[in-house]
Image (spheres, grey):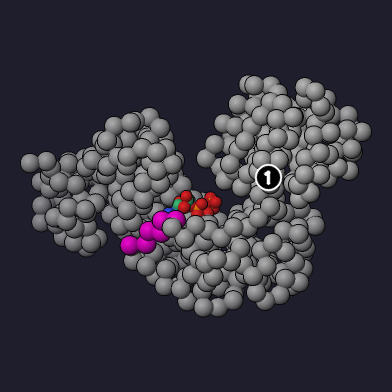
């Protein structure tokens, strides 16, 4: 999606370009309005973001001429000196929004997200990695395949960053790969509910409402009306944070099929494959060779509790790629193995209490075993001593938890020969 940015102040132009790096926008940026018109003559843009005061021509005049060239162009006007009459004039010329300077970059990006939704709803990239080796993810993948054979709305439940959005894209691709897809933050729905123009664009495809726990109470009724009006051929998907509640009338409509997305700590078998896929994607974006993970780095990943889930893993790998340019990642210096991480437990949501305590204790035991193995670098007698167990007792517990002893890719580290 193409965006033309017209801002004569070099430092501010650079700041906005930087803010858009890595986004879905292909940005052309110029300082001069005449040059902007020439750029639009050469190739259309879907969005024009322009300053009001420009050398040789006002932003309003630029908007007028640009929309003559491309009547469907969406426009955002920015200014530190926006008088109400300028704003009204810009709106009359078809501007979508006005950003009074100085503005928060978050506000700028949120506005562009909304415009992106209006401009188009491209299907998700079918080549996006999908890692589902672990048993819980295999089960989820089966459930997604079954859901793909229906027209039912699907509600994804899971912790933040666990991959609810990724599962929604997977389901959409299984259902109808080329159909339009749009992800919207539920918090952005106002009292009017979803924009009808926007729903129009997603006809025949899916709308994914992310962060349903942030939906304003006044948006519930308009959303239900929009769902009723949309009719068949329109697929509703939504993500809700585990443990959050949903207005009953909405739960009735959206919760026809509820799928739980397991947190990363419950699917450690996926960890290294996920890390490799995310590293590959990051390296490709930066146009550099993919670094490999050395054993200590892998071990750190496997031992961490991942309270922030796949999103946390993605952020860590992004930071690491940014800081290192070598062919391999030996360790993650900012990934400390704190004891508090061990007690990241899969708190069951329902009783009876005794069963909840037993499940939490079992998870804590598995984590303590892994931790002791990591601390003793895979040396079993040393790990047994740390845990106050006999060697045989340790082996028995490892078996109980299905922690393998010799598998090269296993979470159990071994001492270097
Ligand atoms: N199974 C998976 N395979 C590959 N990548 C994944 C998988 N699950 C999640 N990811 C990646 O992890 C990142 C976080 O996932 P996503 O945005 O779907 O999380 P979320 O649960 O929707 O988070 P939030 O609720 O906080 O918005 C994304 O980049 C996503 O592509």
What's the magenta region? 128-133
Image quarter where the C terminus lies is top left
Q: Which residue corresponds to mark 1?
A: 44
* Left or right: 294 in relation to 202: left
Q: Is residue 154 above or below residue 81?
A: below
Instruction: Kindly tell me whether residue 316 is visible in this rendering.
Output: no
Residue 370 sits inside the magenta stretch: no
**Front-lying residue, 104 or 21:** 21
**Front-lying residue, 412 or 9:** 9
Mark 1: C-beta under 8 Å from nearest atom of ligand 1:
no
* Left or right: 272 in relation to 193: left
- Indicate the position of residue 128 as horizontal and vertical percent values: 44, 56
Q: Residue at x 62, y 67 (%)?
A: 205
Instruction: Kindly tell me whether residue 58 is visible in this rendering.
Output: yes
- Indicate the position of residue 282 as horizontal and vertical percent values: 41, 42
**Residue found at the far left of this picture:** 417
Q: Secondary structure at mark 1?
A: loop
**Front-lying residue, 378 or 277:** 277
- Indicate the position of residue 160 as horizontal and vertical percent values: 51, 51
Q: Residue at x 37, y 35 (%)?
A: 320
Q: Is residue 105 above or below residue 116?
A: above
Q: Residue at x 55, y 56 (%)?
A: 241
- Indicate the position of residue 140 as horizontal and vertical percent values: 43, 68
Number of disc labels: 1
Q: Main secondary structure of the magenta part?
A: loop
């Amino acid at each position: 999606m193409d965006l033309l940015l017209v801002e004569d102040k070099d430092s501010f132009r650079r700041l906005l370009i930087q803010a858009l790096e890595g986004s879905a926008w292909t940005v052309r940026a110029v300082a001069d309005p005449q040059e902007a018109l020439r750029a639009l003559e050469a190739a259309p843009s879907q969005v024009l973001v322009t300053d009001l005061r420009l050398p040789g021509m006002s932003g309003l005049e630029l908007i007028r001429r640009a929309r003559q060239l491309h009547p469907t162009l969406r426009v955002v006007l920015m200014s530190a000196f926006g008088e109400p009459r300028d704003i009204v004039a810009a709106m009359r010329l078809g501007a979508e929004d006005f950003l009074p300077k100085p503005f928060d970059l978050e506000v700028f990006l949120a506005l562009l997200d909304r415009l992106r939704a209006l401009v188009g709803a491209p299907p998700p990239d079918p080549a996006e990695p999908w890692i589902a080796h672990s048993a819980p993810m295999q089960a989820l993948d089966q459930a997604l395949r079954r859901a793909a054979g229906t027209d039912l709305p699907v509600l994804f439940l899971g912790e933040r960053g666990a991959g609810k959005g990724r599962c929604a894209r997977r389901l959409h691709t299984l259902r109808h790969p080329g159909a339009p897809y749009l992800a919207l933050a539920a918090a952005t729905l106002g009292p009017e509910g979803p924009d009808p123009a926007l729903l129009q664009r997603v006809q025949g495809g899916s709308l994914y409402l992310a962060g349903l726990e942030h939906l304003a109470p006044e948006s519930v009724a308009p959303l239900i009306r929009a769902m009723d009006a949309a009719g068949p051929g329109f697929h509703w998907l939504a993500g809700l944070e585990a443990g959050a509640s949903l207005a009953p009338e909405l739960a009735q409509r959206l919760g026809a099929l509820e799928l739980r997305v397991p947190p990363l700590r419950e699917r450690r078998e996926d960890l290294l494959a996920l890390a490799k896929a995310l590293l590959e994607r990051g390296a490709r974006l930066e146009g550099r060779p993919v670094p490999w993970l050395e054993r200590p780095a892998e071990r750190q990943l496997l031992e961490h509790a991942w309270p922030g889930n796949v999103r946390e893993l993605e952020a860590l790998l992004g930071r690491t790629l940014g800081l290192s340019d070598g062919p391999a990642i030996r360790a993650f210096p900012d990934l400390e193995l704190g004891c508090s991480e061990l007690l990241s437990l899969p708190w069951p949501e329902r009783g009876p209490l005794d069963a909840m305590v037993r499940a939490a204790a079992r998870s804590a035991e598995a984590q303590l075993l892994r931790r002791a193995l990591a601390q003793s670098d895979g040396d079993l007698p040393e790990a047994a001593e740390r845990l106050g167990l006999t060697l045989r007792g340790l082996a028995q517990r490892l078996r109980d938890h299905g922690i393998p002893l010799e598998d090269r890719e296993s979470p159990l580290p071994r001492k270097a020969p």
